[in-house]
Amino acid sequence: MTLKKTLLAAVIGATVAATAMLPMTANAETLRIGYSADPETLDLHEQLSGGVLRFSHLAFDPLVRWTKNFQFEPRLATEWEQVDDTTMRMTLREGVTFHSGNPFTAKDVVWTIERLKESPDYRAIFDPVASAEAVDDYTVEITTSEPYPLLLNLATYIFPMDSEFYTGETEDGNDKAEIIKAGNSFASRNVSGTGPFIVTDRRQGVRVDFKRFEDYWDTESEGNVSEIILTPIAENASRVAALLSGGVDFIDAVPPNDLDRVRDADGVELVEVPGTRIIGFQLNEERVEAFQDARVRQAVDLAINQEGIADRLMRGFATPAGQFSPEGYSGHNPDLVPRYDLERAQALMAEAGYEEGFSVDMIAPNNRYVNDAQLAQAVANMLARININVNLRTMPLAQYWPEYDTRQSDIAMIGWHADTEDTANFFQYLSFCIDEESGAGQYNYGSYCNEEIDALVTAADSETDLEKRNEMLREAEAMLYEDVGFVMLHWQNLAYAAAEGVDVEPVVSALDFPYLGDLVINR
Amino acid sequence: MIAFLIKRLMHAILVMFVISVLAFAIQDNLGDPVQQMVGQSVPESEREAIRERLGLNDPFLVQYVRFAKNAVQGDFGYSYFYREPALEVIARHLPATLELVFAATLIIVLLSVPIGVYSAIKPRSPISRFFMGASIIGISIPVFLTAIVLIQIFSIGITVSLFPEGTAWGAWLNGLLSTEGNMPSFGRGYDLVHVVGHWDTNLVTWNGLQHLVLPAVSLASIMLPLFIRLIRAEMMEVLQSEYVKYARAKGISMRRVYFVHALKNTMLPVITVGGVQIGTMVAYTILTETVFQWPGMGLMFLDAINHADIPLIVTYLMIVGVIFVVTNTIVDLIYGFVNPTVKLTGKPA
């Protein structure tokens, strides 16, 4: 009898305990992700790439982060003020701890900014920052060498790293802080951030496992993901199949051909967001004399039916563009829209003396942008109507960039995303007069050069009155539009898909790094 | 025997040497690895510094000699993408591929022998005709398509509503043709059992086996029809031979004639072809592994190509070369055991 009673008591006890536990565990959810790529490295400063940025938002927190509408949201910095033209004072969040248990203070921010300035990938972006100084434990002053309006944009890239954790020597005598490209550094394998998730296991190209950081500072976040299993699935069809078969809960980069299928599928939701990556073409003025004539460039632009391409070839998965800046960017000018007009294009060609047309080469990648090779083909066909005969060559990404760098073709395709999420960046890399010294116009394939536009954008970049600055950038966009310094096609959309109950809509945006710490799953 | 093995060892070394030279010679056409390592706005001077550090600016011969010197000591260089020694990366991905090839081979052997033999013995039966027809279709469908179709049917599931839902027979037919689709469609699953070293196995857990089925079937689908037809053709030929007729005349039971006397001789050419094909199958895993995100050497190789990860590409090609030599050697050895009249060293007996 006693044995039976004891057993009974034990069973009841266990049941009660289990029930008591329930509310806590029922809330905890595992998220299985199928991304097209996994982070190349765990060292945030080794490579500036989409994969690493997504990872940064999981294991780290930035000082400030972008909202869906391109506003700044306080994260590890709670307040900021411009002390003088070149100095910004930031107040840091108190009571934040790193995964290692070390407390987060101003010295970590200073250390991180200094490391960013050492990083090959970030050095150029952080060039305007002269120094950072810890005023006290929770105040940092960042000084720029000249008045610089985009310091907060840069702050979205400052993910404070645990300076104590990354300082010192490894067992084999290497500096723990060193940044080595494609090498086996300490920071590329070990992580201590402040972010919502801790890396528990990682096999490059196979999977990364995360679990929620119990001492995460943001207790107001409703996010309830307790565990993440990230599997890179590069093949589009396989990624979609993995979601549809219930193998994963969340995927990125749904290919346009599968959009309808995913939209119609039961138990799966598709989330489309307009993107910020401009896709376009550059006309090589060094090789083709005709392209030096603004009328010919205008004719090329007028002959391309951006709306038609976005509508049919991209099946609505793109926003036709007449300028670099997508909506929400500081320099976005609502007046600049695509202006397809074949007759005017033909007239302009005749006016410029090229009625008979000419032949050119074109290069495009075939595995980089959505439908890239088909886009190039479509544009080639459209140019044939103004008697520009295009000989198109497409190639995989690994071969495309070396080919692009030689500038040995007449027209080249390129897609560009502004690392600063700001209008000026497009100009500086894509349309500025080439200056090898300063690195301006590094991706100006066509050697297009309009010093007036350059001067305007440069002036805007040291204008701290943001209203005035935006006005200048809108003006620059209008000038480029008129002069056709870059043939715009569209901004490629982003498409995510998730299983029902995985509410990704609030955490994804045009920025392409979902804030999964705030993701709520309600199955 | 020992002379034979030494000869094969020399072969392997020669193969590795030739492959490494070829792979090195084409590396400039594989793309620029540095481009894959840096963000878009990194200036040319930084890129140049990285190229210099990796020794990519040295002339071909200097690079090759440096590589060969290290390779002789077992150091095949450092993978840019995996940030580990290339050999180590391959060792980690090899077990997954070998398990996949093993499972596919098992499927091929278990199906092709009985089907091939049956359709040789009863060439006119409807079942034989069905298998011959199916094998023609099987040979002509690319493995990528097979894989996608398998995923659609068994992982995602299909709902058929072709027949009138109201009637009993229609509902029954619809239900019969529709599939639930619960099979895993990617990866090796989360339930692997560690065996030794880099070897985690799929073969001992239910979950692991479930993950293995679809990739193995689609990999097997390329070779299976070939083997069915090969075995059938060989068997039919053997059945015409004098000794089979004699055995029959002697009154030996037909079962014994088929499965002991005839089958043995049928298998001789099959073993030769099979050995070579296992090597080919390692190459075919690139497609299968990509579709199923199977983390083996094929997927790794594709990643390496996409990242222009030259050290890994070169090492992979050399290892695959060795795998070919090894399988061929094993085939020759087995051939020797099955047919003692064959002399391995090729010297007169």
Image (cartoon, coloured by chain):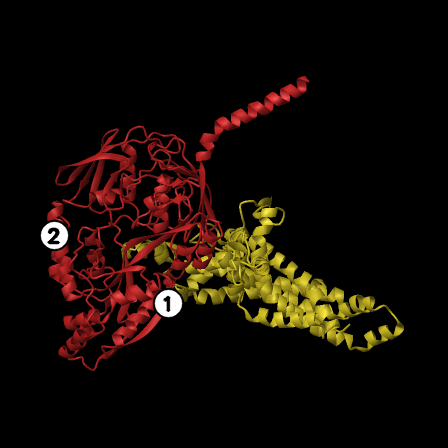
Q: Earlier in the sequence, mark 1 or mark 2?
A: 1
Mark seen at residue A471:
2
Is the residue A88 above or below the residue A51 in the image? above
Kindly tell me whether residue B200 is visible in this rendering. no
Quadrant in the picture for residue B168? bottom right
Q: Assign a secondary structure to mark 1.
A: strand
Q: Look at the picture and state if A245 lies above or below A410.
A: above
Amino acid carrying mark 1 in the image: Met
Tell me which chain the residue with mark 2 is part of: A
Is the N terminus of chain A in the top left, top right, bottom left or bottom right quadrant? top right
The label nearer to you, 1 versus 2, is: 2
Residue B243 at x, y percent in the picture: 83, 75
Residue drawn at point x = 11 percent, y = 60 percent: A452
- In the figure, the red chain has which letter? A
Residue B170: horizontal and vertical position, in percent?
A: 57, 61
Q: Residue at x 48, y 30 (%)?
A: A22
Instruction: Name the quarter where the C terminus of chain A is drawn.
Output: top left
Amino acid carrying mark 2 in the image: Glu
Left or right: residue A153 versus residue B335 is left
Q: Which residue is mark 1?
A: A395
- Horizontal side of B259 relative to A269 (left or right) equals right
Answer few, some or many: residues within 10 Å of disc 2's Cα (few below 14, many 20 plus, some between 14 and 19).
some
Question: Dot 1 falls on which chain?
Answer: A
Taking A449 as reference, is B50 above or below it? above
Q: Colour of chain B?
A: yellow
Label 2's element?
Answer: helix
Q: Residues within 10 Å of mark 1 (few under 14, many from 20)?
A: some
Residue A199, which numbered label?
none
**Residue A503 occupies which quadrant of the picture?**
top left
